[in-house]
Amino acid sequence: MQTRLLLIAPLLLAASLADARADEQVTCESRDNRYQSCALPYAGYVSLERKLSGADCRQGRTWDYDRRQVWVDDGCRASFRVHGGDSRDDRGDHDHHDAKVAAGVLIGAALLGALVHNANTGDDRYDDDNYQGPRHSSYVPGWMVGEFEGYNPIYGADIHMRIDSDGRMSAQARGQDLSGWINGGQLNVGGNVFDINQSRDGFVTTEVGDRQNEVRYRRVR
C-alpha cells in the first residue's frame, strides 16, 4: 500500500497543483425576478462578496450554489467570491500556499480512507429554522458542525477535522493541512467528494466512487 502510494504520488501532486487557484469573482443577476444560474470557473466554496440589488439576497432562498454554478432568484443581483486559494500579491507566499494546498489535497484523499461503517442517517432539517427549502444546497445541519477526530488504521494517522456553520471544513493529519467545504450534504476536498452519514457520536465519510473508502469521526467539541 505504501509503495503504491509513493508510485502514484507524483501524478496526484501534479493534478493537485491545478486545484490551487486564486479566488475569482462571479456576478449573477435575477432579471425581472426570474431564476438565473451562472457558471463557476471551478468547484469551490462560494460566499456573497457584495449585494448589488435592492432586493434581498438570502443564501438558500434567493441564492445558492453547487460544484458547477451559482444561482439567484427573486431580483437578487450580487457579486460572489469563489474561494480557490491565496490571492496575496507576494508570489513567494503564493507558491508556498499552493504547495501547502496541493499537499493537503494529496494526503487528504488518502487519509480520509478506512474500512469502517456504522452510519445512522436522519433528516431533521425541516425542523431547523436555518433550512431554507429544497434549493438550499449549502445547508449544513447542526450535527455536522463542530470539531471531530478520526483515525485511519491503514496509514496510522490521526485526523482532526473542524466544520463551521457556514460549511467550511479544515483538517490536520500527519502535519498536513487540508481544507474543503460542505455542499449538497457532501464533503468536497479538492477533486474528491465524500458522502457524510450521521452516526451516534459523529459521522462517517464515504468517498463517492469508492464505497470502501470510509472513516468514522467522533465529536470532540
Image (spheres, helix red, strand yellow):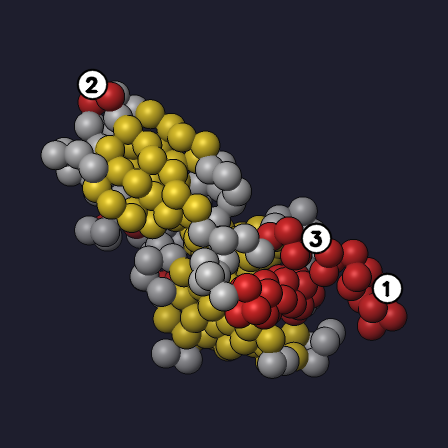
Q: Which quadrant of the figure contains the N terminus? A: bottom right
Distance in Å between CA atoms under marks 3 and 2: 42 Å
Q: Reading the chain from its start, which is encountered first: label 1 or label 2?
A: 1
Q: Residue 36 sits in which quadrant?
A: top left
Identify the residue under disc 2. Answer: 32
Work out whether residue 164 or residue 81 is closer to the camera in this orientation and state it. Answer: 81
Work out whether residue 63 or residue 210 is closer to the camera in this orientation and state it. Answer: 63
Q: In this view, does 35 lie to the left or right of 74?
A: right
Residue 66 shows in the view: yes
Identify the residue under disc 1. Answer: 7
Q: How crowded is mark 1: few (under 14 residues within 10 Å), some or many (20 or more)?
A: few
Q: Are marks 3 and 2 in contact (CB under 8 Å)?
A: no
Q: Residue at x 41, y 80 (%)?
A: 220
Q: Where is residue 187 in the image (x, y as percent from the top left)?
A: 50, 55
Relative to 136, is 145 above or below?
below
Q: Which quadrant of the figure contains the C terminus? A: bottom left
> What's the residue type where badge 3 is placed?
Ala
Q: Residue 11 sits in which quadrant?
A: bottom right
Q: How crowded is mark 3: few (under 14 residues within 10 Å), some or many (20 or more)?
A: some
Identify the residue under disc 3. Answer: 15
Relative to 75, is 14 above or below?
below
